[in-house]
Image (spheres, helix red, strand yellow):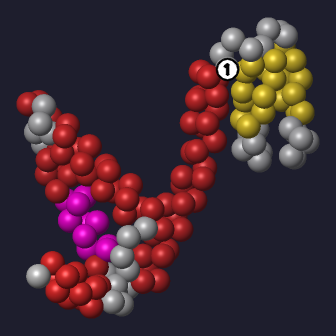
Amino acid sequence: MLEELRRKLTIWMQGRYGIDELTKMLNILGIVLLLLSLIRPLRFLSLAALVLIGFNLFRMTSRNIPKRLEERQKYLLFVSRIRPFFTVIRLNIKDRGTHKYFLCKDCRKVLRVPKGKGRIEIRCPECGKKLIRNT
């Protein structure tokens, strides 16, 4: 019975887009919004969560694969731009006693310097840009 259902679902999904990184993120965001909507003043979030999950189902079952790939590329570009920022925050918390981390404005490389050296000049090894920061 279950095997038959799985076979039919597999046949139905042929030629459709399926699951990617954006789909996974939208699912997590939808679940978080649904959980937040359990709090009385935030009940309006349940509608947003259902719309998000509905859009996600549309993306997964879409046959317009080039459009879905374009959406995925935009999402990956966005994530690649904000990920270094959160990496710097995480590393600054982790090594708060010994080192300080900065982000190069040009190439977005994470730079590590010893803490407690005062105002110093940091040169990015990737692009060569100089930054003057307090440690």
- In the picture, which quadrant includes the N terminus? bottom left
Q: Is residue 57 magenta?
A: yes
Which residue sits at x=15%, y=78%? 2
Quickly name the residue at label 1: 95
Is residue 20 found left or right of 114 in the rendered image?
A: left
Q: Quadrant of the C terminus?
A: top right
Left or right: residue 18 compared with residue 88: left
Residue 70 coordinates in the image, percent (x, y): 49, 74
Residue 26 placement (x, y as % from top left)? 34, 56
Q: Is residue 3 magenta?
A: no
Q: Which residues are magenta?
A: 51-60
Q: Is residue 57 left or right of residue 103?
A: left
The residue shown at (26%, 74%) is 58
Q: Using the image, determine if residue 27 lies above or below residue 8.
A: above
- In x, y percent, where is residue 81? 60, 50
What secondary structure is marked by label 1? loop
Place residue 92 in its image quadrant: top right
The residue lying at 54 percent from left, 60 percent from top is: 76
Can residue 19 be seen from the camera position used here?
yes
Please name whichever residue, 61 or 135, is drawn nearer the observer in this view of the structure.
Answer: 61
The overriding secondary structure of the stretch rendered in magenta is helix
Q: Is 106 drawn above or below residue 26 in the view shown?
A: above
Q: How many marks?
A: 1
Q: Which of the 4 image quarters holds residue 108? A: top right
**Residue 135 falls left or right of residue 37:** right
Query: Residue at the spot x=26%, y=43% of the render?
Result: 32
Residue 66 is situated, as x and y percent measured from the top left of the image, at 47, 83
Out of 52 and 23, give the one closest to the viewer. Answer: 23
Badge 1 local density, few (<14 within 10 Å), some, or many (20+)? few
Q: Nearer the viewer, residue 38 or 131?
A: 38
Q: Amino acid at mark 1?
A: Asp
Quadrant hosting residue 114:
top right
